[in-house]
Amino acid sequence: MNLSETLKLALSAITAHKLRSFLTLLGMIIAVTAFMLVLSVLQGFNTYIDDKIAGVGSNTFTIRRFDFKDFKDTDTLAAAQRRNKDLTMEELSFIRDRADLIDEIGGLARRSR
């Protein structure tokens, strides 16, 4: 069998079973569309995550009363907590009023009681 006979046989099988051919084609179209949709959603999700991570990157800094990783035991940590008081809303307002080159300034409060 040569190539032309093979193509004629394939086309005759397609035309003889029109419903089967249509359903096969429809299944392939649905599968490819679903695959492309999933890829698009994943790409959008990755872009969203990258943007969120970039938002906490080099253009962001944090002011804390002390750095937790500097303390090896609970005694020095407790002493630092007594010595370094919490930042207040007045201090946040002070920084906000004087930081002309900063676009956004916000505060975050955490309590563990």
Image (cartoon, rainbow, N blue to C red):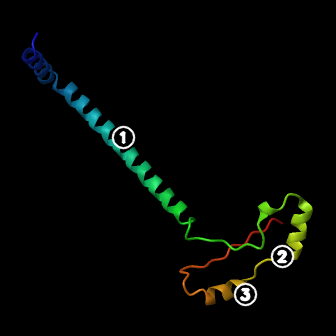
Residue 9 lies in quadrant: top left
- The local secondary structure at tag 1 comes to helix
Pair 1/3: label in front: 3
Q: Residue at x 16, y 26 (%)?
A: 18
Q: Mark 2 points at which residue?
A: 84
Per the image, label 3 sits on a secondary structure element best described as helix
**Residue found 34% across the figure and 44% down from its top:** 36
Q: Distance between the Cα atoms at labels 2 and 3?
A: 16 Å
Q: Position of residue 17 (x, y in %)?
A: 16, 22
Task: Give amino acid for label 1.
Answer: Phe
Q: Is residue 67 left or right of residue 19?
A: right
Q: Where is residue 57 in the image (x, y as percent from the top left)?
A: 56, 65
The residue to which callout 3 is attached is 90
Amino acid on which disc 3 is placed: Glu
Q: Of tags 2 and 3, which is closer to the observer?
A: 2
- Given the image, on which type of amino acid does mark 2 rest? Asn
Q: How crowded is mark 1: few (under 14 residues within 10 Å), some or many (20 or more)?
A: few
Q: Which mark is residue 35?
A: 1
41 vs 11: above or below: below
Along the horizontal axis of the image, is 38 left or right of 112? left
Q: From the viewer's perspective, is 24 left or right of 45?
A: left
